[in-house]
């Protein structure tokens, strides 16, 4: 999963996704009732009740235990965070049996590092299945060389009545060498000084086609924790949504389904508290027409998708870790791909990596009905399938070429623009992913003629 952007981790957010970003309900006929309320994610040692599962493309041997650096007791968790450009450390601590955590209002843990650093993200509600509904997290934890306690409030504890995702984290460095990170005393608690929840979501105006499914973004809650405001980002499942016109749009777990032409306003509540922010959706038909036909000779092109050339084998046009939906369309005999709910989409050719070392350019035709920017990321993997490096470029009304709505735009990009000796790309001999994303108001994208060329 990709959790980083612009020279960092490929594919979370996703991050959580990063991607890119779920909670599998494991309660079933064989699950005893009532569920246990055990608050411990980790204390001293692994007991078999909670297992660690590394995230995809992370440093798989990053986790260990340490009997010399613990905050309390006889042991703690030790994480080796790799150097910049080598990847990241991250994963989920998953309970073997679902737990009822509704009696607590926060996840707490102790952490320290071998040097002053920043922990990218930590949270709960991610059981690493890709189906989580109640993931919540904080970002940018300042780490010191001594133990400190950290608190992550739970947006709505009643949602965690059958939860397996006890704790997750992602840690990386942008430049320089990595560091050692220690965790201890990871548990759920009830903290009386957590108060004043102020839920919010990003206000948006979204245009898309009837039948599309869109996502609410920026769902978060600000809490007062012992006199200090803390912002918790979380999945939309914590909110209850309402539509001003269900014939136009309905909402389930934050997924907006466009049922008919027209306009509707989407509002939400966290329990009984109104959520700040309104999402306005406009549903109607869009007709992109045809993209210009490429004119380069086939001998100079390695095509991922185009009717004008033979195409390189692509494993998927919408990876399991992304949130987009891709549909193949045929317009006047020409094949194009339509992405809806286009927060980010992962196009993977990992089994057949592209050696673009002899290529000079990357081309992609895009058509968007609205949106302020569109991003293109190329990702290089190592031979063992781990992340090597990546680089993301952004296009808007002032870029070269500019992003223009309502017409086909040919993004002609010199491959050297993706190369950077510090941030990446470091090489383009095993390109394995193409990740496209856009501004929060860009949810529908048509693409055609995606190729590398000499």
Image: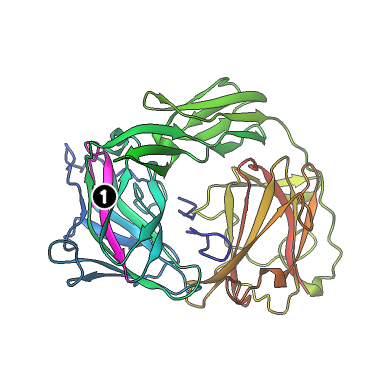
Residue 197 coordinates in the image, percent (x, y)? 37, 33
Give the residue drawn at x 57%, y 38%: 214
Name the residue tied to disc 1.
108
Q: Is residue 95 left or right of residue 1?
A: left
Q: Quadrant of residue 205?
A: top right
Q: Residues within 10 Å of mark 1 (few under 14, many from 20)?
A: many
Visible residue check, residue 379: no
Q: Position of residue 270 (x, y in %)?
A: 40, 29
Q: Nearer the viewer, residue 137 or 12?
A: 137
Q: Determine the image quadrant of residue 199.
A: top left
The stretch in magenta equals 96-114
> Which quadrant holds residue 62?
bottom left
In magenta segment, residue 107: yes
Residue 72: % across, % down: 15, 61
Q: Please say if 280 is above or below 298.
A: above
Residue 78 seen from this side? yes
Give the structural element (helix, strand or loop) at label 1: strand
70 relative to 345 in the view: left or right: left
The outermost residue toward the left is 73
């Amino acid at each position: 999963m990709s959790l980083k952007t612009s020279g960092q981790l490929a594919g979370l957010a996703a991050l959580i996704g990063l991607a890119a970003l779920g909670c599998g309900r494991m309660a079933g006929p064989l699950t005893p009732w009532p569920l246990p309320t055990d608050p411990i994610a980790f204390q001293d040692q692994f007991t078999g009740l909670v297992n660690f599962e590394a995230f995809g493309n992370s440093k798989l041997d990053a986790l260990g235990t340490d009997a010399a650096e613990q905050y309390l007791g006889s042991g703690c968790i030790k994480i080796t965070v790799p150097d910049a450009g080598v990847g990241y450390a991250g994963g989920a601590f998953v309970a073997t049996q679902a737990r009822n955590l509704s009696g607590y209002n926060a996840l707490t843990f102790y952490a320290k590092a071998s040097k002053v650093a920043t922990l990218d993200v930590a949270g709960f509600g991610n059981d690493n299945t890709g189906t989580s509904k109640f993931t919540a997290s904080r970002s940018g934890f300042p780490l010191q060389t001594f133990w400190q306690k950290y608190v992550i409030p739970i947006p709505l504890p009643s949602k965690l009545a059958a939860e397996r995702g006890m704790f997750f984290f992602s840690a990386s460095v942008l430049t320089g060498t990595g560091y050692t990170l220690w965790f201890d005393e990871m548990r759920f608690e009830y903290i009386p000084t957590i108060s004043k929840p102020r839920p919010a979501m990003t206000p948006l105006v979204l245009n898309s086609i009837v039948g599309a499914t869109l996502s609410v973004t920026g769902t978060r809650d600000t809490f007062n924790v012992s006199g200090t405001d803390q912002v918790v980002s979380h999945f939309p499942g914590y909110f209850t949504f309402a539509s001003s016109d269900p014939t136009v749009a309905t909402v389930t777990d934050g997924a907006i389904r466009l049922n008919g032409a027209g306009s509707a306003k989407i509002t939400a509540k966290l329990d009984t508290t109104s959520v700040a922010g309104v999402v306005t959706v406009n549903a109607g038909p869009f007709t992109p027409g045809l993209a210009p036909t490429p004119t380069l000779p086939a001998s100079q092109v390695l095509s991922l998708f185009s009717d004008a050339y033979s195409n390189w084998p692509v494993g998927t046009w919408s990876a399991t870790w992304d949130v987009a939906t891709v549909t193949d369309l045929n317009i006047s005999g020409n094949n194009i791909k339509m992405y809806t709910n286009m927060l980010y989409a992962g196009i993977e050719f990992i089994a057949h990596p592209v050696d673009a070392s002899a290529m000079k350019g990357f081309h992609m035709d895009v058509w968007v009905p609205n949106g302020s920017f569109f991003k293109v990321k190329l990702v290089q993997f190592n031979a063992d399938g781990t992340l090597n490096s990546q680089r993301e470029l952004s296009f808007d009304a002032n870029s070269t070429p500019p992003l223009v709505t309502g017409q086909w735009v040919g993004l002609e990009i010199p491959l050297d623009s993706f190369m950077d000796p510090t941030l990446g790309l470091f090489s383009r001999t095993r390109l394995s992913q193409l990740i496209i994303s856009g501004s929060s108001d860009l949810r529908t994208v048509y693409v055609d003629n995606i190729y590398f060329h000499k």
